[in-house]
Amino acid sequence: MQDALRLSGRGRKDFEVFAKYLKMIQDEAFRCKNITERLLEFSRGGERKRERTDLAQLVQSVLDVTQHLQNSKGKEIVFRPRGAVFAWVSAEEIKSVVLNLVVNALDSMDEGGRLTIGLAARDGQAELAFSDTGCGMTAEVLENIFEPFFTRNRSGKGTGLGLTITHRVVSQHGGEIEAASPGEGKGSTFRVRLPLQAPAEGATHGTGTAGKEEGLGHAAA
């Protein structure tokens, strides 16, 4: 069939149009597959084993991977931990939180941008701060940033589930996540707080909601 189409200029043009739309269908199929996988992940909500975890080491392991991503080229990531900070978490789940926040920040910045990650222990909690020099957010975006299917990914390819799942994971750990930005074009900050100690026996902590105190937080979407 392809040989027949190529016999004439008209046939060649038709083939190119066909190939273009076939590629569009393929891209949308993969996008739908990704959304389905994220929905399944979101609906499971099961808790994995939690243990005392070195957060500085955890963050660094994520950065060792993200520095090789295409969207990290020409951008700087600075990690500034204040000493050793250990928290009672599921390492794999918190890795997914860190990875999502880092990738979002990288997506929000142009070449020459900087992402600064801070880590410290404060008031019985571990606090991670992700501050970027990216495109920033409006008040409307901040209000909806953790809602399912809400995305501000500049590529237009985000599923709108990454920050929702991140919010859920942090809440299930008994922690908080907050987003803040001084405005469009002025960068953003996410702050994640996690418990330093294991909860008391019999205590529950899987249904909390993340705080949104004014003036705190980060976001890239």
Image (cartoon, rainbow, N blue to C red):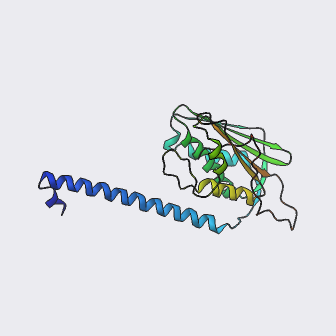
Residue nearer the viewer, 93 or 132: 132
| Extreme residue in the top direction | 112
| Left or right: where 96 falls relative to 194 | left
Res. 64 in view: no
Q: Residue at x 20, y 52 (%)?
A: 13
Residue nearer the viewer, 110 or 212: 212
Q: Position of residue 87 (x, y in %)?
A: 78, 52
Image quarter in which the N terminus is found: bottom left
Res. 2 in view: yes
Q: Residue at x 87, y 66 (%)?
A: 201
| Extreme residue in the left direction | 7
How many badges with numbers are in the image? 0
| Left or right: where 130 falls relative to 34 | right
| Left or right: where 194 falls relative to 143 | right
Q: Position of residue 88 (x, y in %)?
A: 78, 56
Q: Is residue 130 above or below residue 111?
A: below
Q: Position of residue 159 (x, y in %)?
A: 53, 56
Q: Position of residue 122 (x, y in %)?
A: 83, 43
Q: Residue at x 19, y 60 (%)?
A: 2
Residue 24 lies in quadrant: bottom left
Residue nearer the viewer, 201 or 208: 208
